[in-house]
Image (cartoon, helix red, strand yellow):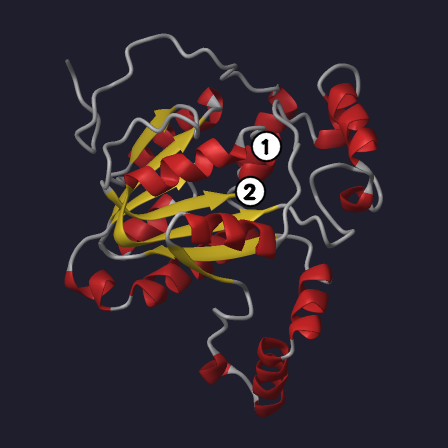
Amino acid sequence: MSTNASGAPENQAEPSWDTSSHEDFYRYYEKQSMSPATLARFRATTDLLLRLMGPAAAKRKLDVLDVGCGAGAQAKFWLDSGHRYWGLDINQPLIELARERSRREGLDAGFEVGSATELPYADASMDVCVMPELLEHVQDWQSCVNEAVRVLRPNGLIYINTSSRLCPVQNEFNLPLYSWYPSVLKRYFERRAVTDWPAVVNFAKYPAVNWFTFFQLRQYMRAKGFHSKDRFDIVQVGELRPLQKAAIAVVRGFFPLRVMGHILTPYTLLVAQKKSV
């Protein structure tokens, strides 16, 4: 039996999920994945996680898994930093694009088509698991997190960037204030999005079905033995101006202001570290 890059058996069975892509969705992400804003965001994510990994990132090569990697734009930043990278996505055309770009740029990255709920990697085989804009699209989001926990080594990091239930501004549905819609109305638009209104979700095969708060995810990760940080915890205050430092200190120390900060930010961000055994 053949194995993948992490030593786990390859899944020889035909996938039971739809790995195709709408042409408009593919073209959008083909362009968007290489935009200056996207690349700057991925560079910042890489730098953040390397900083949070601390001495481990300098002492050895880290194994990094990018779940929901799309066209694999994060690969270059991790590989240029001297680490190993694997990307997985359910969208086969985007994975093929990621492989093509990787070959063209001479990057030693591994890309696989697969489901985030059944990761084809061995237990405790990764140091960092990045899940950007993923959990909102998978009905069984708990299985996604559980799989990331399974493949992560002790002291490893999980990075989650997902939809916000608190902020009315969002990019998943082309509808105003959608995050605040009642569940029954959201279910209605979800059904229409996959039948006769695909443009309302930019032709996504799997539109967003979950909406989160940091506090909800923190509670779930705490039960898994993780310590979690939000966007205010991970700010590197040494680079800020005095007034900005003071503002962050107030937000960190005054819970209502922290909640207000989450309400004003159109996505939920969490970085969780697995406790050592």
* Residue found at the far bottom of this picture: 242
| Amino acid, disc 2 | Glu
| Amino acid, disc 1 | His
Q: Position of residue 5 (x, y in %)?
A: 20, 31
- What is the quadrant of residue 199 in the picture? top right
Image height check: is 30 above or below 11?
Answer: below
* Residue shown at 74% from the left, 54% from the top: 167
Q: Is residue 36 visible?
A: no
Crowd rating for badge 1 (residues with CA inside 10 Å; few <14, some 14–19, many 20+): many
Front one among 255 and 13:
255
Q: Position of residue 190 (x, y in %)?
A: 74, 26
- What is the quadrant of residue 124 in the picture? top left
Labelled pair 2, 1 in contact (Cβ < 8 Å): yes
Q: Report whether 36 appears left or right of 157.
A: right
Front one among 192 and 87:
192
Q: Position of residue 67 (x, y in %)?
A: 42, 37
Image height check: is 181 above or below 168?
Answer: above
* Residue found at the far top of this picture: 14
* Residue shown at 79% from the left, 20% from the top: 192
* Residue shown at 31% from the left, 38% from the top: 150
Q: For mark 2, what is the residue?
A: 133
* Residue found at the far front of this picture: 223
Quadrant housing the C terminus: bottom left
Secondary structure of the residue carrying tag 1 is: helix
Q: For mark 1, what is the residue?
A: 137
* Residue shown at 26% from the left, 39% from the top: 106
Real-space CA distance between mark 2 and mark 1, rounded to the nearest whole angstrom: 8 Å
Query: How many dots with numbers?
Result: 2
